[in-house]
Image (spheres, rainbow, N blue to C red):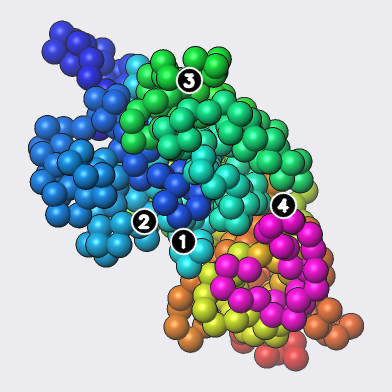
Amino acid sequence: MSHQSTLIADNIEQYLHEHENKDLLRFITCGSVDDGKSTLIGRLLHDSKMIFDDQLAAITQASKKSGTTGEAVDLALLVDGLQSEREQGITIDVAYRFFSTDKRKFIIADTPGHEQYTRNMATGASTASLAIILIDARYGVQTQTRRHSFIADLLGIQHLVIAVNKMDLVGFDQARFEEIVADYRDFAGQLAAPDIHFVPLSALEGDNVVNRSERMPWYAGPPLLELLEGIEVSRDRNLTDLRLPVQYVNRPDLDFRGYAGTLEAGILRPGQAIKVLPSGRTSTVERIVTFDGDLEAAWPGQAITVTLEDEIDISRGDWIVAADAEVAMADAFDADIVWMHDEVLAPGRQVDIRLAGRSVSGQVGEILHQVDVNSLERHPAERLELNAIARCRVELTAEVPLDDYGTSPGTGSFIVIDRLSNVTVGAGMIRGVARSGNRPTGEVDWAGFELELNALVRKYFPHWEAKDIRELLK
């Protein structure tokens, strides 16, 4: 829902133009169980006038049956919509909400605090630029606080807002707030996030959420919403290294062949020289096509269709990069993996790795070390259980283009798929390129060879198949 503005009645076209060009911030709320994540989002929406009358009436009625705030309206029900969530008073699945203010548009992901649903928290964090980590002022920093902070940091979120909630239950005590800040800073010294803010608030009462609290005059910083409006995230994007993973080949008729995908990094313009991986063929961008017309330039996050001046064999999962880009090609890499399934992960288990639109078979060849989320210390492990986080060596059956997650999250992340059930069992972030040790020296890499051979065969011998040539060469 958009904010209320007089322009809606006076000049709707001007309002829509201003609204369309606002900056967008994606953020998540996370933390331990019952820290007040859903209530905080409900309070943000309510106090910034982002709730329709019928929505307010619906949650008012639902509060009488499922509410946990007595006679008051339970604002947490705005995002906790599942029946099981309302019955148990917890968040289970990720809930997304959109709202806007005069300065910015927002997409919120409310993530669960229970350890059992840590995988859902990681899912919500994967597209966020900022994380609000809630801490109950009564209990301070908990295990889930550390786990969620570490996962947010692991996923490259550079902006953390530590919201010390339920200050009303500790008498708005400044000393208690400062004690929690000191405890968290001791832990955060091991994180890479460069931008951390602390806000004391009461989501239930509305103190320091949208409006500054008069009951905490000792806090000189901005309320939460003002802080969210002012944090700069546009510089976090990689505008240097062009990365366009192809998700779909658009061929509606004989006169058009386009390659559709979301630009993950870099800036793309017509006339730009590009290279296709893994084939290595080069060409020049002819057009950048969108539903609203051709673009003069495409930026990270935009969904586009690219046409090229040359006919090149490009398939789903191929990358379009700058012509002079040096991208690693390898059949193994080191990665931080968050394991998301009850069935343990043991080295050697065959899985499918889905990376930037490409699916390739592989296995976790070795668990290099597991991370203790409480101390962030590393220790050896023979297998990974649910919610475990570890640095692993992943081995593939073919060479593919690889990026470090820190450079390009969109092409440096992957998911692990169980080959029998097709269920997502893990998510990972690439941290370094390696070469698999499971291929004997001197053996031909037929999988990688066939990819390159297919490109040549389809261009010069369209009636032949690469597998036939492979048999001849054998």
Which comes before the other along the chain, label 3 or label 4? Answer: 3
Separation (CA) of disc 4 from disc 1: 30 Å
Residue 296, percent across and down? 48, 27
Residue 370: in magenta span = yes
Categorize mark 4 by other alpha carbons within 10 Å: few (<14), some (14-19), many (20+): many
What's the magenta region? 361-388
Q: At numbered mark 3, what does the secondary structure look like: helix, strand or loop?
A: loop
> In this figure, which residue is indicated by the disc labeled 4?
404
The nearer-to-camera label among 3 and 4 is: 3
Q: What residue is drawn where x is 79% and y is 63%? A: 378
Which comes before the other along the chain, label 3 or label 2? Answer: 2
Amino acid tagged 2: Thr
Amino acid tagged 1: His
Residue 349, percent across and down? 64, 85
The nearer-to-camera label among 2 and 4 is: 2
Residue 384 visible in the picture: yes
> In this figure, which residue is indicated by the disc labeled 2?
91
Q: At numbered mark 1, what does the secondary structure look like: helix, strand or loop?
A: loop
The nearer-to-camera label among 3 and 2 is: 3
The nearer-to-camera label among 4 and 1 is: 1
